[in-house]
Amino acid sequence: MSERSVSKVDVILEAADNLIIKCELKRHLSPKAVGQITRALPLHGNAHVLGKSAVYFETSIESGIERSKNVFKKGDIAFLPVGKLVCFFYADTKIGKSMTVIGRIIENVDKLSSINSGTSLEFYCDTGA
C-alpha cells in the first residue's frame, strides 16, 4: 500500500495503451490547485502535445495562478488556469504562459514522449493496490 501523506498525493497518469506514469502532487507547491485537483480525481481527457516538451489535457478545474513560472524542468507537472490544463513535462523548456507547478513525475517520465495527440488519458489516485 502506498504511504499516505498530507503534503503529497500519489497519482497515476495512464494512457489508453496501458502506459503507467507514476506521479505525485505536492500541496506546498500550490495548496489551492492541488486541493481542487485531488478532490476532482479521477480526471479524464484527450492528450495534446506541446512541442517536444510536454503532454497536457483539459480539465474542469477552476483555480488561479499560485507561484507562477514559465520555465519548467523535465518531470514537472503544472496547471494552466487559462484553458484549465494539467501539463506533464518530459523535457526542460521555457514557455510563453505562466503556469503553477503542482507536482513531479516520479517514474517513466521518458515514456511521455511516446503519447500522441488524441490518446485517452486518465489521472487518478494511486491506491497502491
Image: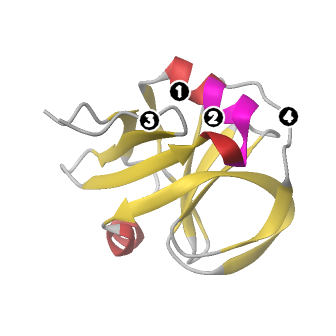
What is the number of the mark on residue 34?
2
- In the image, the segment drawn in magenta is 29-35
Describe the element under mark 4 as helix, strand or loop.
loop
- CB of mark 2 within 8 Å of CB of mark 1? yes
Q: Earlier in the sequence, mark 4 or mark 3?
A: 3
| Number of residues whose C-alpha sits closer than 10 Å to that of mark 2, classed few (under 14), some (14–19) or many (20 or more) | many
Q: Residue at x 23, y 55 (%)?
A: 19
- Asked whether 54 or 5 is in front, the reply is 5
Q: Quadrant of residue 70?
A: bottom right
What whole-number distance in Å separates the C-alpha atoms at marks 2 and 1? 6 Å
What's under tag 2, amino acid-wise? Val
Describe the element under mark 3 as helix, strand or loop.
loop
The image quadrant where one finds the N terminus is: top left
Q: Nearer the viewer, mark 4 or mark 3?
A: 3
What is the number of the mark on residue 5?
3
Q: Residue at x 33, y 53 (%)?
A: 22
Residue that badge 4 annotates: 64
Q: Is residue 46 covered in magenta?
A: no
What is the number of the mark on residue 71?
none
Residue that badge 1 annotates: 38
What's under tag 1, amino acid-wise? Thr
- Asked whether 2 or 114 is in front, the reply is 2
**Vertical arrangement, residue 127 with respect to residue 28, above or below:** above
What's under tag 4, amino acid-wise? Gly
Q: Nearer the viewer, mark 3 or mark 2?
A: 3
Does the image show residue 115? no
